[in-house]
Amino acid sequence: MKRIRVLLGDDHALILDGVRASLQDQFEIAGEAYDGKALVDAAEKLRPDVVILDISMPVLNGFESARLIKKSLPAVRIIFLSQHLNPQYLKHALKAGASGYVLKSGAREELHQAIEAALRGQTYITPSFGEDVRSQLLNRSGEIGADDDELTDRQREILQLIVQGKANKEIADMIHVSVKTVEFHRARIMARLGVRSVAELTKVALQQGLIAE
């Protein structure tokens, strides 16, 4: 029988070591990545069955990485392994296409359950959230609804890089657009979130779960 292939993404080597050790007897570890962009590239190259990733990663955070991976590989199952028991983070993980959300503190007990549920087409959310949070986020079809005022994928990508301290020219070079395009999106992001400085932008983005701490 073909083994399920799993791709891992986290910027902490110790976490990757632990997850690999926990899974490798039952699943094939297809690869590992230490930042979001590398994870997206690895997913497109290796075409795994499951991607397990952290929210807080350099270059691209987990939310943006998941969105891009689901765009190119719609059938892949994505499971977030996070330290954050934050309903906003769970909300954005589900919107990004996640099939599971597991806390790092409970990974040894729950990760296998999450993978198996995801492969059955189900959504696994760590019980630590409580049933009330799950019922508030998921509709009757088991999917999460979209917000009318949410940022576009490109704006989320640029937001992440702004918060990381990248200048407009750096961002333009990294995502292969013009500086004017970056300036346009930067202004739209600021206006949509109602902020005027990068410090305010970072604070609001954290509060709304648009980026991870």
Image: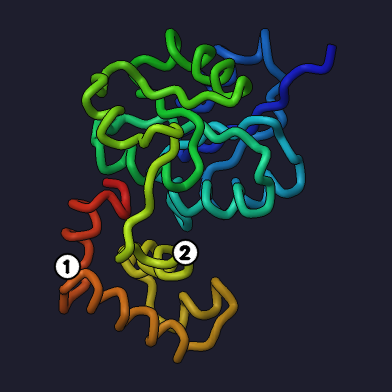
Residue at 60% from the left image edge and 33% from the top image edge: 77
Q: Residue furthest bottom?
A: 180
- The percent position of residue 166, horizontal first and vertical second, equals 38, 72
Q: Which residue is mark 1?
A: 199
- Please identify the residue farthest to the front as the structure is shown: 140
Is mark 2 in CB contact (under 8 Å) with mark 1? no
Picture layout, residue 6 above or below residue 190: above
Query: Which numbered disc covers residue 153?
Result: 2
Residue type (three-letter) at the residue carrying disc 1: Ala
Q: Amino acid at mark 2?
A: Asp
Q: Residue at x 22, y 62 (%)?
A: 202
Residue 176 appears in the rendering: yes
The residue located at (38%, 62%) in the rendering is 160
Foreground mark, 2 or 1, reads 2
Write down the quadrant of residue 17 in the picture: top right
Q: Earlier in the sequence, mark 2 or mark 1?
A: 2
